[in-house]
Amino acid sequence: MTRVLASDLDRTLVHSSARMAPDEVDSPVIEIYKGRGITVTRQATLDALAALHETGGFIPVTTRSKEQVARIEPIWAMAQTGWLVCTNGATILRHGKVDAAWEAQIDQLCADSAPLAQAHAAFTAEFGTPETVDWMPLLRDCDGVFLYCTLKLDLSPRDLESRANQLFAPLGWRAILHGRKLYALPNGVCKGRAAQYLRERLEIDELMAAGDSELDVELLLAAEHRWCPIDAELVEHGAVPPRTRLTQLGHVGAGEEIALDALRWARETVAAG
Ligand SMILES: [Mg+2]
């Protein structure tokens, strides 16, 4: 029997150095951006993920674009000899190359959703642009697949997420607020669907999943064994799917708990033979 961990990265397995506790200063820096170390994890997490990866037991599943995930050097190195789901499930890479069969499926899944330019036009007509409003410093697209904007939460409209969802529903898009970012995605672009595809393609018997945000809910629900960090937004919002294990520690401690627990589960099946 095979058990594979399909896990979100940011705030689940890897964490912002800005939120690091003072006693975590030895945590390895795994992402440098504009000369600054911005992402950390624990060495034990990296070791457990590498051990899982060795037997094909780890698939990173992230909302980051390919270029953004490539900055996390140890994860990107693993992806060169394995699988990686990026762009929130829109793109699957095998050994760093796009999986064409999934690309074709995504095109079909998004056939009923409006093109990105139309969703962008609808959003800016309703809410404005970084040039015209003071609460949206940035509005971008990710790989031409979906949109996201950063928010000044104290200034942005309080009902932004629900209004955006009303606006997007007829376009076959949805909006998800996560931290100080609002994501707008075609309905077919979903981490859970990508994980289901890989489950069938790789004949995975049992899926293990971990995630911290609304963007991870379908991924968590697709798995038999699931984890959520105790300091996650899903916990804060009371939106953790049933039968999900919460970690005892937060931040990099949560990442380590999840990686070690997943490795233990994966090895149990090997031992059971
Ligand atoms: Mg996350």
Image: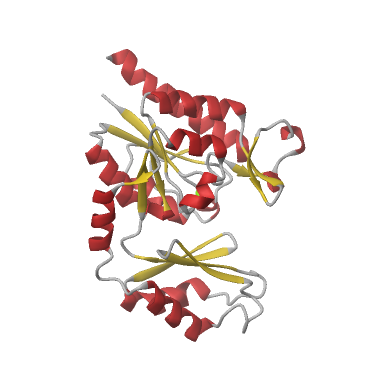
Q: Is residue 105 above or below residue 260?
A: below
From what the image shows, is residue 229 above or below residue 206?
A: below
**Number of dots carrying numbers:** 0
Please state the horizontal and vertical placement of residue 32, each as a whole percent of the image. Answer: 65, 45
Side of 247 where 7 appears, left or right = left
Relative to 190, residue 80 above or below: above
- Furthest-front residue in this view: 97
Q: Nearer the viewer, residue 56 or 151?
A: 56
Res 198 quadrant in image: top left
Residue at x-position 61% and y-position 36%: 41
**Residue 250 seen by the camera:** no
- Is 134 left or right of 144, judged from the image as shown? right
The spot of residue 58 in percent (x, y) is: 40, 33
Q: If the image is split into quadrants, where does the C terminus sit?
A: top left
Identify the residue shown where x is 43% and y is 36%: 80
Farthest right residue? 22
Q: Quadrant of the image for the N terminus?
A: top left
Residue at 30 percent across and 71 percent down: it is: 113
Q: Position of residue 260 (x, y in %)?
A: 50, 26
How far across and down, in percent of the image, does residue 9 sit?
A: 50, 43
User: Relative to 177, is 77 above or below?
Assistant: above
Q: Residue placed at 52% from the left, 45% from the top?
A: 70
Q: Is residue 83 visible?
A: yes
Give the colour scheme shown.
secondary structure
